[in-house]
Structures are given as structure tokens and as C-alpha cells.
Image (cartoon, grey):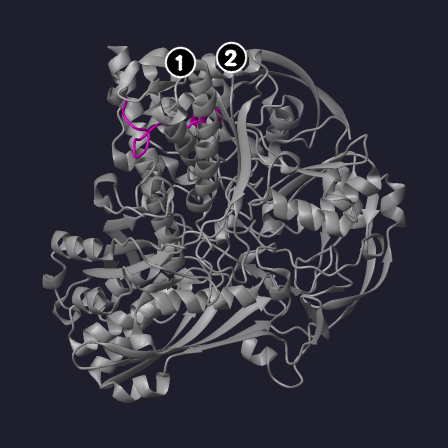
Amino acid sequence: MNQMNESVIGKNIPRSDGHAKVTGTMVYPSDVIIPGMMYGAVLRSPHPHAEIVSVDTSEAERMGAVCLTYADINPIMYNERSVSIPAATYRDRTVLPSKARHFGEPLMAVAADTEELAHKAVKAIKIEYKVLEAVYDPDEAMKEGAPQLYENIYLGDNKLTVKNNIGVVRNIDEGDCAGGFARADRIFEHTFDLERIYHNQLETKCAVCKPEPDGSLTVWATAQSIHANRQLLARILNMPLSKLNVVRLPFGGAFGSSIQVNTVTPICACLALKAGRPVKLTSAREEDFYSHQKYPARFTVKMGVTNDGVITAAHVKALIDFGAHQVQPLPFMGCTAGWFASLYKYDGNIRFDGTAVYTNKTPCCAMQGYGNPQINFAIESMIDIICEEMRFSAVDFRLKNYRGIGDEFWGQGPTIRSIIKSCGVEQSLVEGRKMTDFENRQRPEDRTGDIRRGLGLARGFHTSGTAGPKEGEVIDYSSALIKINEDGSVDLVTPVTDHGGGTWDALKKITAETLQVPFDMVGLAPAATTNTGYDVCTHATRGVYCGGAAVYHVAMKVKERLLEYAGRLMAEHAYNLEVARRDELGQGVVQVKHFPSKFMTIGDIAKQAQIMSWGTIAYTDSYRQRNCPPCFTTHFVEVEIDTRTGVITVPKVLIFGDCGVALNPDLVKGQLIGSFNRGFGYTVFETMPLNEKTGELMNKGLLTDYKTPTSAEMPKIEDVEVILCDTYEPSGPYGAKGIGEAALASVQAAIANAVYNAVGIRFYKLPITPEVLLAALKKKEQEAAK
Amino acid sequence: MSMHPITLKVNGKPHTLLVKSNELLVNVLRDKLFLTGTKYGCGIAECGACTIMKDKRSIMSCLVPAVVADGWEITTSEGLSKGDKLSPVQEAFVDLAAIQCGFCTPGMVVTATALLHENPNPDEDFIRDYLRGNFCRCTGYVAMSKAVLAAAAKMKEEAQ
């Protein structure tokens, strides 16, 4: 009978937190309200670059505000991001700076009884600035005599001198590039430019900190990693880790912007400790824009290709303008090199020369892909250029050159590599070609009329986690605690956070499947840093693959103990027993193999174990994955361009996703569609021009002037097709790998390639706004007239 | 600043409150009535996260000074369900995976509910246009349109 119970793996089960989310009862960090709490507000720099000459907070204090200035903080230097090992971490910032390095940088903060009073108190602080010359352009910043943001920074414990604002140089060279290029029949070289993007998570970054009677501090904050927050706060506040409890909460989106400890969180903690009262600090939207932005990038890509369609070498030069603080451009460039290196084989000849530069702009951080969407746009545009010019099939050329099963994949830069064991690339390209009749698409020169359609393709991937067989620059492991309760229900305690993609339900499913209990009998316990082992972060598409692997490992240990206790109670050898789900009993059982009528419910086993004082059936441990399998995506996009207005729309999109076994297919598809929406925005809308006189964003931090695609601009329901590849990842829990960041990787290139197919114009810089497109069409027309 | 007494009926429950003249309805709902389902995303009607319903029409509560709302009867996301029973819109959002981080969800389901009051038989274009003022960074909206269509069908079925 138990065989009749359908497995939860791969089944669409409505998400467990759905009820709380649609009724608005789910508590996010900004919903945390504590009796007697004060409200924080931040004084942000009105200058892009300025020294603080003097500060007078007396008026604000007379108003009843608690003020926090540079003089109040522990001036240790840190990096907000702590997923890299300390020796590979640059440190250049303090809780509040002694000098303003970008417009909108938090300089001071206050806490007051009301939000209104807090903002009035901020206005009452008097500061005298010595305004310095600012530099925004990375090329200008590297010139002799340019304004210098820093004299010294640290790499690990080593003090470094900053020259010409160059923050990090990262060069990687493998194989024999010169030889590879020499063997090529054609050499292609182009430069691609990608803009800064604002994460635009709907919940602005927030923290609530509460000093407890025992001298500890409880923190509710927007965080992708509770343990990263705890460890950094302990260092800054000089408190034992045991006195810092960071609570795991859902958050209203992050997209990478909360991998690092958010700038407001230590400020809030310092305010709360100074005030001796709980403090809530929520960023206004206009402030959040200046918190972190996505890394922009300029890539010069050189590729050598033979006449029979083999890429013989590739060289990428990268220039990264990362703004006023390092949120780790070192691993960012390493990862970017890795995505580049892992897309195609290049005959093993690759070179990456990366330079990352300080400028007086908002610090940049990860955003869904950590360099992957950026470099993917460059490489997949380049592949399209090669195929167009050499008249190769865009599908066959990719199939001939891609890295697939048996090849090496760089999951997190050059130090984290593993061998690809599952791959949906061929299925995606071959099926997609057939479904879209791709090879018979019209050529750009054959397309005429005011309205022109185009069909484009690009493929991409992302890693699942940051663990390889050998440890490298990045920390990766997770932890879990699972216990069986005396009624057959199960408590799952995990430090893993969920962006909303459904990671928590996936972890519940892995528990339910391993212990063979009904899904609803697994409870996701509230969790915090004091009652969970370490998990590095829900980043790098590792929630299911790495967090899930820890849950699987621990569930197997719990099962072992369960079978042992059941064996004692049932007078059977443990190896003669198995777990089975019995939905009709509302719980799981332990039964004799091939003789299911002899069984005990797991609730009874736990209860008997309790009565006999054997102990609770529970286990906790940490677990490290030893692979970083790529999850692949391919996008076939049809665009429609109105050549009179320059507006690009997407009438149709076909998306292939390879996440191994999809634990919850609807949620996987949701991530792919949501990512398409964002990628569409990056390709045609999103841009962040700066007022170069003031360093202020031209949109002044307003959403209205930061255009993103709305419901009305997405393709219609029946015009969005998502196909999940039939793959199984042998190293993943129940065959699963990730999908989150891969979902975005190839969107921009696919749209830009479709635009080329529609109008015959190659865009090397994003976004392709209507103005940009119209200007390009006009230029093309003028050139044709000559 | 002077304080003003107001009465407010929220989700069928009457409240008498003292509010400042510059206090916004969104803050009163969140900080005084602890109805934090009405989210704060921008404070200036750019995102729709704070959408509530008054007289079956959706409005953004960050645009309403609390004193203006004196005497109003309003519904928030918390008031759409009856006990544990979700409304058809809420149920469809859960069943059709129209939720990710969930921060836009309360405002979105309120807007979708108002949509179906206004037009019980919407087509997809009507829905796409109607939801435009509610910003979601996660889902790409497609599942939401599906959910609203499904809710409309279910409500029609229940009415028969």
C-alpha cells in the first residue's frame, strides 16, 4: 500500500509559506516591532568625496536623539562580505567612515523615539566638510593625479598601498593562448559594456536590534546568511559570538544584495547598544539605491576560430568599476573568469586580465550571477557574431565547442573546480532549434517593414554552490538538525535562508523523502545563529544543492537511529527494516522489508524511546558538498521592434532549464520566468546615469525613474514556454542541482542576438533603450545611403 | 503637532485612534494596528506594496493621510480570508505558484481582488494592464495573470 504514495520529489506541492504570504501574516525584518523600540535614521553624504572636518550633534541630542558618529564606533576595518577565506578578503571600511567616498554614503546615524524625530535629529546635526574632487570614470581614476579614494587597505592581515585607485588586479592564464590564436583562421575582437543595475528588491534593507537583559544582542535583519551577520557583528562590537543571536527570517528579495552584511545592520547594532534600547533601522527607497548596486563591466573579448568551427583560444580583458568600497571584486573577477572559461573549451587556451578600480560611486556587490550575466552577454554575443560572419549554425557551433559531461567546470573562480556529471545543453539546443525552426529563421537583411521580428539564442549556466573536491578561496558547507517527535512529526532546523525560490520547501521535501514521512509532517523550525551550525550563505545557487545535501546527510543519520530503535522494539535486525510513508496513518512507519504488515509508526517508536529513556531520535551535523555542478539554461527569444519608436517587445520566449531533478517544478519554472523579466529589464530599460557635478543618481533614488518591466511588458501566458531538461545530478540530493542564478545568465545575450536578427545591428553596450535603438537605426540608414 | 481622533473600520473591526496630521495610513495600519501585511516599499506610490481596498477599489495607503481616512471602512490582505479559508484570489496565488519572496504578494492580491470586483470576467490583457502599478521583482508576473484568471473562473463557478 505504501508504494501507492507518490513521492514528493518532483511533485508540485503548493508552497508551505503561501498561506502566510497571501494573508500578509508572514513577518519580514521590516515587520518586526518591539515594544519600546526606537527608530534609527542615517545621515548620508551630500558629496561624492569629502573629508569630515567637524561634527556637532549637540542640537540633535537636545532633541532627545542618540547620535552615532565615527568617534563612537570601533574603527576596525572589515569587508561586509565574508564568504571568501580571510586571506582572500580585502578590507577597506569601518561601520561609519572618517571620510565620505560616495554620494549617499552613511556618515552618521541617530535613534529617537519616533521616526519623525529621528529624521529631524539627522537634519539638526551640523557637519563641516572639506569637499574633495571626485572621480567617476574608471579610466580617469587610474590616471596619475586622479583623486585618490584610499592610501591604504588590507588584504587579509597585510597592509597594502593603493596606487591609482586600482583595488584588485587578477590575471589568469592557462594553456597557450598565443599558440591558439596562431592556429586560428579568423580572429575576432570586440568590447562589451554593461551598466550598473539596482537590485530593486521590494523590501528595502532593514535591521532591528535588541539589547537583551543578559547582555546579549538579538538581531532581525535582511540577511542571506545569519552566521555571516553574527560573526561580523561580534568582531565589530567586540562581543562573544554566544552573545549575538541573529534570527533567520524571510526577506523581501535580495538578489545578492544581502550576501554581505548590509551597511545598515552594524549601524543599527551600534545605535541599539549605545541607546540601551531596541532600535529599528529601515532604509528609505531613496537610500537603498545608494546601498549597493550590481557590478558594471567592460570586457574586451578576443577569440580565434578555425574555418571548421573550433575556437582555438580566448582572451578577456575586464575593467570593473566597483565604486567606493570593496565588496570583494577579487572573487568577482575570479568567478567571472571561471564563467568565461567554462562556457566553451577554447582548446584549453584562455587568458583573463582583470582590473578593478575604485571610483566615487556606490559600492558594487553580487547580483544574481556574480559576473555571469555580464560575461555571458559578451561571450554569447561574440559567438553570435562569429556564427553570423562565418556562416556557422548557431546551434552546431555551440554544440561543437561547449563544455559538457566529463569537462571541467569552474564553480567559483580558478580555485574551485569539478567535473561536469549532468548536462542538459544538447537537449536544450537540439529541441529548441526544432521547436523554433531556428535554422530557417530569416536573415536580418531579408527583414523589412516598420515592425520587424527577430529570433535569437543564447545559452548559459551557473554553478550549484562553491564546493569542489579541493577547498579553495571560498568557504562552503552547511549544517542541519533533524529530530523525530513523539507523534511522528519531524522538526527541521536549518540556518539556510530562502530568497523565495522555494529553498525551504525543497529542504522539507528532502527530509520527508529520506524519512518517508508526509510532507506536512515536516516542520521548518524557527532558527537563529545560537541554535544552528554554520551555513555560509544562500548565494551561488547553493541552497538546495549544498543546504539540501546537509539536510539529506543528517536525515540519513536520523534514519539510522530510527531503524536501530525500531529494531529493538520490534525484535528485528535494523538492516531488515525500512522506512515507508503511510499517508492513511498520517505519518511514516518502520516496517519489515517485504513484510509491510509488521510495522510501527515512527511516532510510536519515538514515544517508546522516550518512555524507555533511550533518548530523542535526533542528529545534527555539518556537511560539505565536493562538487559544484553547473545548472544550464538556454533562451530562444523572439523580439519585435517598432523601427519608428525604437521600442523592443518580446512576443515569445522559450526557456530551457537544467536543474537536475526539479524538486518542485512550478517553483523552478517561476524562477526562470522571473529571471527572464529581470534580464529583459537589464537589456532594454535599466540604467543609472549620474549627475557628475554632485555624484547623485539622476533618478534621485526614485523607482518611477528607474524603469523595470511591468506585468504589461511580459510576454503573455501562452507565449512563455519553459522546459525542464531530463537530467539527474548524481552528486545532488535526489538528483537536484541549482537553478536560481543560471536562470538569468543567458537572457541578455539572447535578446540582443534577436535584436541583431531583426534589424542587423549589433549592440555591444546595454541597455538598448528606444533612444539607443533609434540612433543606431538612423546611423545604419545614413551609412547605407553613402 | 496636534493629534486628531479618527475612527477606522479595518477588516470589519472598528478602531478609534489618535493620529498626527502628518501620519500616513500605511504607518497607522502597520505600527498602531500591527497589520504588517500592508507593506512599505517606497512611501510615495511607486510600488503598490501598501495597497488596500476601500469601497471595492484598490488604493495605496502610503498616499492617504490617516486623518483623511477618518470614518473609512477598509480591507487589507489580512481581511481577505475568512478564518483559515483563503479567498479565491489568495488560493489561486498559492496553488499556481504566483509567489516568490512574497513581499509584493499582499498588495498584489488586494489589487487583484479589486480587479475582479471591477471586472469579474477579465481577459489576460485587462489583468496585465491592471496589475501594472504593483511592482514585483521576483516572479515576472506571468503566474499572477494565470492566478487571477483561475480565481475569476472559480468565483464564477461558486456564484452559479
Relative to A667, is A136 on the left or the right? right
The residues colored magenta run A5-22
Q: Is residue A276 above or below residue A205?
A: above
Q: Marks 2 and 1: in contact by CB < 8 Å?
A: yes
Residue A350 in the image: x percent, y percent? 38, 77
- The residue lying toward the viewer, choosing from A296 and B119, is A296
Residue A62 in the image: x percent, y percent? 90, 42
Q: Is residue A368 above or below residue A163?
A: above
Q: Are marks 1 and 2 on the same chain?
A: yes
Q: Is residue A557 above or below residue A344?
A: above
Specify the amino acid type for callout 1: Met
Which quadrant of the rendered structure holds the C terminus of chain A?
bottom left
> Quarter-wise, where is residue A351 in the image?
bottom left
Query: Is residue A252 in the magenta section?
Result: no
Numbered disc 2: secondary structure: helix
Which quadrant of the rendered structure holds the N terminus of chain A?
top left
Residue under the image location 17 percent in, 69 percent down: A444
> Quarter-wise, where is residue A549 in the image?
top left
Mark 2 crowdedness (10 Å alpha carbons): few <14, some 14-19, many ≥20: some
Residue at the limit of the structure toward the left, as seen here: A440
Query: Does residue A194 appear in the picture of this structure?
Result: no
Numbered disc 1: secondary structure: strand
Residue under the image location 25 percent in, 47 percent down: A727
